[in-house]
């Protein structure tokens, strides 16, 4: 049963510390998405990759957030330095990423990383 | 801007059909409508999608109006486990026409199924 995995599932850290979240997409999927969910803002798209290349990171605060795909089996989202307002659940999703909006595109979401910055 | 409109909340009795409406009046002719749901503390889960014709799978049915300006997700026999936030979504192409499946989530409809 293929699924997206994320680590850690929970992270509590202090303001100013570096946080790294990891995601293993489903094998064969070429598109990876990072979302953030808070009560106030709901689900927001932060960035996404296709074939490991960043396509759009306009939803991400550039000064402290960075997203990378070192290889096809690993995507990382890093926050440095972290701030209390970064507290949220961060979801990774993967899919086959058809190029056309008229084609079927299902995203498979991981269980999320719950981040708390004190 | 999610470009879809859904009621913020709905209730349904267990065993009854849950009908969740969605307005997508600006949808273009080649855009699919997707439905996802998010059960508390879990990642969103795909339910169904459609273009013009009505669709049915093991989870739900999707009814799309002929003008494609709105759709209804139907859970034929709702159970307590169907209590979740339901999102109606479009995949909005980028300026260049590609999309790669990028989803833009709105607030969704909180469906509460009562015993």
Image (spheres, coloured by chain):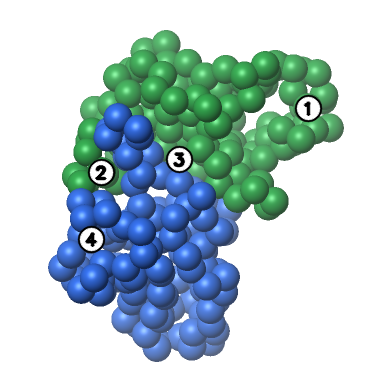
The residue indicated by pointer 1 is A83
Q: Nearer the viewer, residue A57 or A94?
A: A57
Mark pair 4, 2: CA separation: 12 Å
Mark pair 3, 2: CA separation: 23 Å
Give the residue at x 40% y 68%.
B23
- Name the image quarter holding the C terminus of chain A: top right
Q: Residue A110: give its label.
A: 3
Query: Which tag is nearer the camera, tag 3 or tag 4?
Result: 4
Chain letter for the residue marked with disc 3 in the picture: A
Q: Secondary structure at mark 1?
A: loop
Mark pair 3, 4: CA separation: 24 Å
Location of residue A52 by image quarter: top left
Chain letter for the residue marked with disc 1 in the picture: A
The blue-coloured chain is labelled: B
Q: Residue B50: give its label.
A: 4
| Whether labels 3 and 2 share one chain | yes
Q: Is residue A77 above or below residue B30?
A: above
Disc 4 crowd rating (10 Å Cα; few below 14, some 14-19, many 20+) is: many
| Whether labels 4 and 2 share one chain | no
Mark pair 1, 2: CA separation: 36 Å
Sequence order check, earlier mark of 3 and 2 = 2
Q: Is residue A50 above or below residue B6?
A: above
Q: Is residue A59 above or below residue A81?
A: below
Chain letter for the residue marked with disc 4 in the picture: B
Residue B106, horizontal then vertical, whole percent: 52, 55
The residue indicated by pointer 2 is A101
The green-coloured chain is labelled: A
Chain letter for the residue marked with disc 2 in the picture: A
Residue B6, horizontal then vertical, whole percent: 48, 68
Residue A85, horizontal then vertical, whole percent: 76, 35
Mark pair 1, 4: CA separation: 41 Å
């Amino acid at each position: 049963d293929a699924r997206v995995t994320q680590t850690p599932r929970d992270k509590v850290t202090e303001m100013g510390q570096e946080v790294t979240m990891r995601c293993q997409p489903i094998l064969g999927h070429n598109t990876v998405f990072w979302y953030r969910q808070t009560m106030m803002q709901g689900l927001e798209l932060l960035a996404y990759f296709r074939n490991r290349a960043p396509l759009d990171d306009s939803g991400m605060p550039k000064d402290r957030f960075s997203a990378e795909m070192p290889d096809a089996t690993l995507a990382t989202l890093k926050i440095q330095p972290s701030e209390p307002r970064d507290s949220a659940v961060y979801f990774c999703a993967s899919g086959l990423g058809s190029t056309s909006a008229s084609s079927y595109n299902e995203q498979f979401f991981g269980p999320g990383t719950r981040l708390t910055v004190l | 801007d999610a470009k879809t409109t859904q009621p913020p909340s709905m209730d349904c009795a267990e065993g009854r059909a849950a009908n969740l409406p969605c307005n997508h009046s600006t949808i273009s002719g080649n855009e699919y409508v997707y439905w996802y749901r998010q059960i508390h503390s879990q990642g969103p889960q795909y339910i169904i999608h459609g273009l013009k014709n009505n669709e049915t799978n093991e989870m739900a049915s999707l009814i799309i109006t002929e003008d494609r300006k709105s759709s209804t997700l139907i859970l034929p026999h709702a159970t307590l486990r169907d209590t979740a936030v339901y999102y109606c979504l479009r995949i909005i192409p980028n300026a260049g026409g590609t999309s790669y499946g990028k989803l833009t989530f709105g607030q969704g409809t909180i469906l509460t199924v009562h015993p």
